[in-house]
Amino acid sequence: MSDPARPERIDFSGFEAALRRQAAERAQAARTPAVPTALAFGSRLTEVELTWIEKKLEHWIRFGRIVQDRILTRRTRVVSFRPGAIFAFVRWSANDYGTISSRIDIMRAVATGEPYTTLPFVRPGGDILLHIEGWPKVSQVLAAIDAVETAGVDPCDAAPDHWRHVHNRIAAGHQPRPYTMERHKAWLRRMEIEG
């Protein structure tokens, strides 16, 4: 029987493990010479700052191959992508009356020396394949991402031209054409020929 004067114990084991991991990483960094993290991968990484404040401000990655993940605070972390990686970054915010803004960007991480477009919370920026604002249109993009996964293709591996197509069709008020396995095989074949 629990004592009403004594509160229940809260499990902080996951948070404590993350703090121990960060302390170990700091200790390792202190023992090694100061080299920018991106140089360990041979090129600059694209970093995305993610924030999660339940029902107020939510930034998350819908898809993408993350190569680094740093926890800054309980609500903020930074994820990194290698040059050439394609990822989807969703930003949503609300107040007491409902949604203020919602956006989704599908972008390609750029290598050192490549031109790029800046975007909030993305350092340095990227090659933007799709940029959609407003929840009805964002939900259409999320459905298009689900359709690519249903076709048996990882959205990271889909042709960049497909995401440009989805952007243009939704911006024009039309339904995007589905991404099929046949289109994906044609994209892979094109990459072999160009490669």
Image: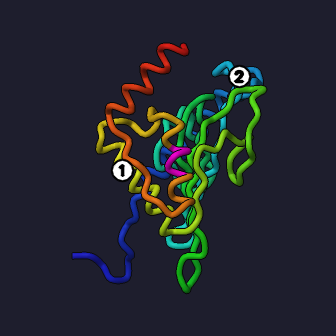
Circle 1 sits in a helix, a strand or a loop, which is it? helix
Residue drawn at 44 percent across, 27 percent down:
187
- In the image shown, does 35 or 2 lie closer to the viewer? 35
Magenta residue span: 163-167
- The question of residue 166 being in magenta is answered with yes
Q: Residues within 10 Å of mark 1 (few under 14, many from 20)?
A: some
Which residue was labeled with disc 2? 39
Circle 2 sits in a helix, a strand or a loop, which is it? helix
Q: Position of residue 54 (x, y in %)?
A: 50, 69
The quadrant holding residue 111 is top right
Which residue was labeled with disc 1? 146
- The question of residue 184 being in magenta is answered with no
- For badge 1, the amino acid type reads Asp
| Residue 59 seen anywhere in this rendered image of the structure | no
Q: Position of residue 57 (x, y in %)?
A: 58, 67
**Can you tell which mark lies on residue 36?**
none
- For badge 2, the amino acid type reads Leu
